[in-house]
Image (tube, grey):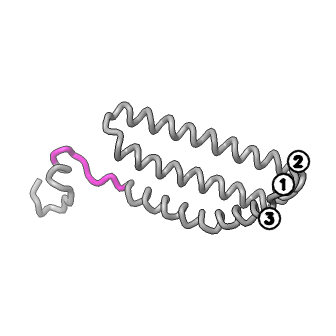
Amino acid sequence: MAQGSGDRRSELGRVRGLGTAKEGVQHWWAQRATAVALIPLAIWFLASIICLMGGTRAELVAWLGSPFSAGLMILFLLALFWHALLGLQVVIEDYVHHEGRKLATLFAVKGLILVLAAASVASVIKLMLQG
């Protein structure tokens, strides 16, 4: 294929038959979006925890029994776990060079994050229903 025929791939990309991955920018934006979402959610969470310090379990359950508090807590947890997953994925892809280990580690981390996120959200819902 001639250079000027509209093929914008690099020399190596043409040889391998690969173009751009087109996933890096989307991953970058998702990580930035979760980071921005975590700023007000983390401030809300820390302020709430400070206000609840020294309180009883019943007060905590009453606080999470509010649909507003439970909803914000679930948003906080989902943004937190998604942000963590995106960051860990980048670290694994950059520093684990053996392809088999990389895939196994990514699979294990994604599974662990999914289980922890599901358990966390389920706990919030359980506490909300008790309130």
Mark 2 vs mark 1, foreground winner is: 1
User: In the picture provided, is 93 more to the left or to the right than 76?
Assistant: left
Mark 3 vs mark 1, foreground winner is: 3
Numbered tag placed on residue 7 in the rendering:
none
Q: What amino acid type should be assigned to the residue bearing mark 3?
A: Cys
**Circles 3 and 1: CB distance less than 8 Å?**
no
Query: Can you identify the residue that label 1 sits on?
Result: 60
Numbered tag placed on residue 130 in the rendering:
2
Query: Can you identify the residue that label 3 sits on?
Result: 51
**Placement of 114 over or under 41, stated as above or below:** above
Magenta segment: does it hold 18? yes
Q: Earlier in the sequence, mark 3 or mark 1?
A: 3
Q: What amino acid type should be assigned to the residue bearing mark 2?
A: Gln
Which sits in the foreground, 91 or 31? 91
Which portion, as a residue range, is magenta?
Answer: 15-22
Mark 3 vs mark 2, foreground winner is: 3
Q: CA–CA distance between discs 3 and 2?
A: 21 Å
Q: Position of residue 5 (x, y in %)?
A: 14, 61
Circle 2 Cα neighbour tier, 10 Å, few/some/many (<14 / 14–19 / ≥20) = few
Q: Position of residue 117 (x, y in %)?
A: 64, 45
Circle 3 Cα neighbour tier, 10 Å, few/some/many (<14 / 14–19 / ≥20) = few
Q: What amino acid type should be assigned to the residue bearing mark 1?
A: Leu
User: In the picture provided, is 34 more to the left or to the right than 103?
Assistant: right
Which residue is painted at 18% across and 62% down in the image? 6
Q: CA–CA distance between discs 3 and 1?
A: 10 Å
Magenta segment: does it hold 26? no
Which residue is painted at 38% across and 36% down in the image? 102
Q: Position of residue 21 (x, y in %)?
A: 33, 52
User: In the picture provided, is 12 more to the left or to the right than 58?
Assistant: left
Q: CA–CA distance between discs 2 and 1?
A: 11 Å
Question: Which residue is at the far front?
Answer: 54
**Placement of 3 over or under 14, stated as above or below:** below
